Each structure stands twice: as C-alpha cells, then as structure tokens.
Image (cartoon, grey):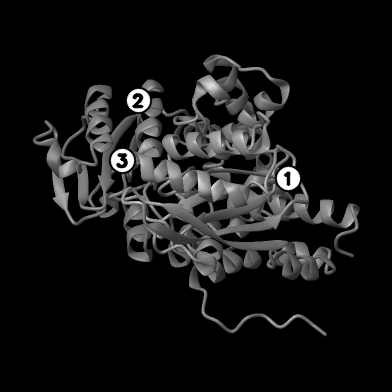
Amino acid sequence: MAYVPSTVTEPEFEQAVHEIGTTLTPLFEKRPELKRVFEILQIPERVIQFRVVWEDDKGVCQVNRGYRVQFNSALGPYKGGLRLHPSVNLSILKFLGESPFEQIFKNALTGLHMGGGKGGSDFDPKGKSDNEIRKFCYAFMKELSRHIGPNTDVPAGDIGVGGREVAYMFGAYKQIRNEWAGILTGKGYDFGGSKIRPEATGYGLVYYVEHMLKDARGETFAGKRVAISGSGNVAQYAALKIIELGGTVVSLSDSKGSLVATGEAGLTPEIIAKIGELKLKFGSLVDLGEVPGFKYLAGERPWTHFKSLDVALPCATQNEVSEAEAKALIEAGVGFVAEGSNMGSTQQAIDVFESARVKGLVGGKTPVWYAPGKAANCGGVAVSGLEMAQNSSRLQWSEAEVDAKLKDIMEKCYTTCFTTAKEFAKEGEIPSLVAGANIAGFLKVANAEQAIGTVW
C-alpha cells in the first residue's frame, strides 16, 4: 500500500518540508528516483514514548511522559536536543521549532558523522527544587538509557535542559550502565565537555558570513553595520566576534523589545557583557537602563528601524523576519542575511530575499544574499560533534584547537553549499545558498541511504 501523508495540520513541519522540498525540484528533474527517497525521509525511523515516575520533596509520587524521536541515522548516531517543558508531546517534538527533520540536513552539512533526533518530557523544571530536578533526571535516564549510546543516539540540551540537567543525566547514565561514555553533549569541561561550546553557534555564524562577504564583494566585516536580533548566547557571541573583526553592531533584542542604535556608534564588549549578566538573572533589555547612542523600542523587532544597513543576523527565534520586514531590510541596503536562529525567516520573507537575489547585481553589488539556518548556524552542533570526537578518543582540545576546527567546518559547509548552488543555478544567476544547503544536505543523506540499502 502506498504511503498516505497525514491530514493533520502540522504547520512548522510543513514549513520545513516545503522550504526544503521546493528547492529540490532541479535535483529531482535530474534524478527523479530521489523524490521517493525524500518522501521516505519524512517518516522517523523510530519513536519512543515512556513514563517517568519520580518523587517530589513532599514524598509524593509524580509521573511525566518521556519521548525520543529517532529520525534518521544514515550518517551517524541520532543527534538532537532534549526539551523539558509542559508543552512537550510527540507532535511538538516533531514539528515545533527546528524539527529533527531539519536537523538531519543541518548535521549532514557539518561533514561530521551525526544523524537527526529530538526528545524530552512534559516535566516543568520551573518552580522545582534542585533535588526534584535531580530526581527527575535520574528517573528520566533510567528508561532513556536503554535507547541511547555513543554509537546509537547522543542527545544534547534544549529548552529547560542546561548544564545542570545534562550533568545529572550523565551521572544517572554512568550509574545505571556502570560506564563512562559520551552519551550527551553540552557537558561540563571537567567531565567530558568541549571548549567554546557556548560561543560556537554565534562564532560559526560569523565565520560563515565572512565567506559570503568575500565571495560576493571581496569584503570583510570591517566597517559593516550589522543588525542582530536576540540577546542570548548566539546573539552575544556573534556580536562580540563581529566587533573583534571591525564591524559595528547596531541592535540586539529580546521578547519584550529591541535596543537599536540612533547614530553611527555600535555596541561595545562592555555593554554586551552587562547584557550577558542580565540574561543570567533572567532579566530583560528594558532593565539595562540608558545606553548611550541607543534607544529601547518596547514590543518591537529591530528590522524596520534602519536607514542604512549592511548585514542582518536573526538570532532570536523561529519566523522572526516577516515579509514586510524583509522588504524593509532590502530598502535599508542590506546585502547579506544569515540565520543564527532556526528557521528565523518566514517562507514569505525567504521568497523576498530570493527574489532580490535573482534580480542579479545592482550597481556592481549583490542586492541581498540569504543563508538559511541549517547552514549558517550549524556551528553549535558542529562543536557538539567535536565533543563526541574528543570523548571517543579520551582527549580534550584547547580553545584554540576547537576554534580552528570550527572555522574549518564552517568554511567547508559554506563551500559545499556554494559549489552545489552553482551547479544548479541558472546561467548568469547568483547561486542560491538556500538551494545549495538543501540539495547538498539531502544528497548526502539520500546517497548514504541508497548505498547501505535502507531505501531503493
């Protein structure tokens, strides 16, 4: 019987499938047999659901649901985050934010041996004591440990799962299995973690855009005005790296509003450090007080508030750049847009950027060149992969060594995307990095699936 797609509305998943699928059309015209492979890859290899029974501080027995979606392992062990949030269910894990479907192709673009997966529980860590969180993590790992391993599935953190939770889960696995194994990434450095993991996504994003600037215009970040959204790790470390490279950062934001430059001056490392301290205390940018040369815009995103701009880096959340905001960025003169957030632009915004790209050169310059998150922000999962490699070899690399390897991975990722894009671009057209990333990532997985005989 032929596979019949679900009729349930799954907008986030459908967005990911549509964004990838539409750019694969030129590939399917050359290799029509791969269209069936694409349909098969949309179904997870395995879905695991289990109960988690734990004891709260009052001695009361509590129960939550635990999940792991093991989507694809053609290129390596399943790899993807664990989320602890009351909204978590199987649908959320598969379709909310960056789905494991999207993760498959991002991981493929790193060039490392990682598949795609996602997991978590409807446990709410908010309001829980440290002891209750420890008890939950141990109970959660009691069942999850049956389904993961350094050569099978290596989860990482996500919403609600930070360094503390990763450490507890790692300790639980070690106790249950009586073995030290790299079965989680994002660990503390003293027990198997990697240097520059917090910085990796932001640094990697900047390294990727460096190659875009060089290939498109022979330029660097020096003197460039760069708008960034978000104010978490990705945004902070991207901003610091851009400042180091001579660029000017003219905005950061959070869920309550935006901090936007009023003149030529940009944010300084000192201000970004203050923002970092504020965020560790769960504060908002509005609590920062007056910042010279900047204004705070309550309830606003930064994209429509610039008359002159060179680079835009969405680093906050999904679908944070709308069609109207994409048009405003182009009007401000943006030449480069790259996503530090997962699926940061709506499909309508991507269409605006891609339409501008197709129009070709304007005054000798590209009007706008857009890089999707699956390529531009893969630095985070790349360093997770490097953590796996360090664990397997029982070594730990220095910060300089990890940073050098990250630069190399981002360069190879960009080169793969650009080379593939050129192969499928129309004559005289600026290559699409969206198509390049999607085709290159999909081809790597599809070729592996066919070679090992799991699809035919």
How far apart marks 3 and 2 lie (CA) works out to 15 Å
Residue 367, compared with residue 214, is above or below; it is below
Residue 152 disc label:
1
N-terminal label among 3 and 1: 1
Instruction: Give the residue number, with chain letter if any, for mark 2.
Output: 243
Amino acid type at mark 2: Ile
Residue 410, compared with residue 133, is above or below; it is above
How far apart marks 1 and 2 lie (CA) works out to 40 Å
N-terminal label among 1 and 2: 1
Q: Residue at x 19, y 57 (%)?
A: 299
Marks 3 & 2, CB-CB < 8 Å contact: no
Q: Residue at x 55, y 23 (%)?
A: 191
* Element marked by disc 3: loop
Left or right of 415? Residue 33 is right
Image depth: mark 1 or mark 2 in front:
1
Instruction: Give the residue number, with chain letter if any, for mark 3.
Output: 231
**Quadrant position of the C terminus in the picture:** bottom right
Q: Residue at x 26, y 26 (%)?
A: 273
